[in-house]
């Protein structure tokens, strides 16, 4: 049994609404937690008690250093310590925190792979993020792009998607080209407006500082001094992916995101992303980060759905 004293200021955030954070820690560490004011008692197996102590000690150190816990930070900390009892929570949350507050929202990784992803973007000029929906691939890349633009590390942002849809074709949408393209690129706009004031972002788009366009518009261009994001890259053809990866100019960064389980290309075309992962696997200077269901940061049901589909796919392959 361990008794842990916690700071009274911020105790509501530590405990969570209806003690949700404590219940989460109980479930993943298989311990019982009782509260008495700002003191908690943890009872369970020795390893579970030790990890619980690490969680709360790490969070208290963060708070004492002036870090303001955001919604979800306690759950993230608990998951990290559950996976690795020696993880340094202060390093994980505080590293680069000031830089990432240049965006409208404070951007902190919610998993080990998200931290690897952000660090890879800092380190490499080309980064590929692959994994299921809701793992933050596009969102975090957009946050980094806006941060780089605000810090004047690049002079523009280019956001692109291949024009392939599941069951719909752009040609059947009403309106001119811009009106046809905008609904398809809406997720990129949504992520952008979440990072930057919409009025300011709109002005930057009008001036060409931020460009949102179908991948086909990249052909024949060299992108210098730019932060380029290719979203939904699983729907590129081999030729399109090669074209994109060879657009990179001086002073630029490129982030490629995709989910190889969500390919909408008509058969028998091969996904450019799937091929590229093999081609560039050993190319020095390129970072590749794989996400999984543990990195899903949407509603907790999304994580369960991702797991269920993975299990179903594994079962189908073994039965086949």
Image (spheres, helix red, strand yellow):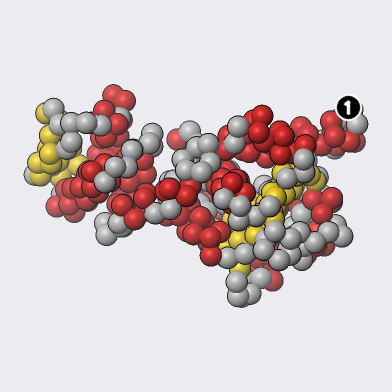
User: Residue 185's spot in the image, x, y percent?
Assistant: 74, 38
Residue at (85% x, 37% y) in the render: 169
User: Residue 302's spot in the image, x, y percent?
Assistant: 51, 37
Q: Is residue 26 above or below residue 289?
A: above
Residue nearest the viewer, comparing 20 with 62:
62
Residue nearest the viewer, comparing 194 with 74:
194
Residue nearest the viewer, comparing 130 with 4:
4
> Which part of the image, by quadrant, shows the N terminus?
top left
> Residue extending furthest top?
18
Q: Is residue 192 left or right of residue 106?
A: right
Q: Which residue is mark 1?
A: 174
User: Residue 131's spot in the image, x, y percent?
Assistant: 57, 52
> Which part of the image, by quadrant, shows the C terminus?
bottom right
Which SS class for mark 1?
A: loop
Residue at (50% x, 37% y) in the render: 105
Q: Is residue 227 left or right of residue 7?
A: right
User: Residue 258's spot in the image, x, y percent?
Assistant: 65, 51
Q: Is residue 297 left or right of residue 163?
A: left
């Amino acid at each position: 049994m361990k008794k842990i004293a916690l700071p009274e200021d911020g105790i509501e955030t530590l405990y969570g609404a209806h003690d949700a954070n404590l219940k989460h820690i109980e479930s993943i560490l298989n311990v019982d937690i009782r509260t008495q004011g700002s003191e908690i008692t943890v009872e369970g197996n020795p390893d579970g008690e030790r990890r619980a102590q690490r969680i709360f000690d790490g969070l208290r150190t963060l708070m004492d250093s002036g870090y303001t816990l955001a919604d979800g930070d306690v759950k993230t900390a608990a998951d990290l310590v559950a996976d690795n009892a020696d993880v340094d929570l202060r390093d994980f949350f505080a590293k680069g925190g000031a830089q990432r507050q240049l965006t409208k929202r404070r951007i902190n990784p919610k998993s080990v792979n998200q931290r690897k992803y952000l660090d890879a973007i800092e380190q490499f000029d080309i980064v590929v993020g692959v994994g299921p929906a809701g793992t933050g691939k596009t969102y975090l890349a957009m946050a980094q792009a806006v941060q780089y633009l605000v810090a004047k590390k690049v002079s523009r942002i280019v956001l692109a998607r291949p024009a392939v849809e599941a069951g719909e074709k752009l040609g059947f949408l009403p309106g001119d080209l811009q009106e046809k393209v905008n609904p398809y690129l809406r997720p990129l706009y949504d992520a952008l407006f979440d990072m930057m004031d919409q009025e300011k972002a709109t002005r930057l788009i009008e001036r060409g500082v931020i460009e949102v366009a179908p991948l086909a518009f990249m052909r024949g261009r060299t992108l210098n001094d730019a932060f380029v994001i290719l979203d939904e890259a699983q729907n590129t053809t081999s030729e399109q992916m090669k074209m994109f990866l060879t657009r990179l100019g001086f002073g630029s960064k490129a982030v490629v995101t995709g989910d190889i389980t969500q390919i909408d290309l008509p058969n028998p075309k091969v996904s450019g992303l799937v091929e590229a992962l093999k081609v560039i696997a050993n190319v020095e200077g390129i970072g590749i980060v794989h996400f999984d269901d543990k990195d899903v940061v949407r509603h907790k049901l999304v994580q369960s759905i991702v797991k269920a589909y993975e299990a179903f796919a594994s079962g189908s392959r073994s039965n086949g």
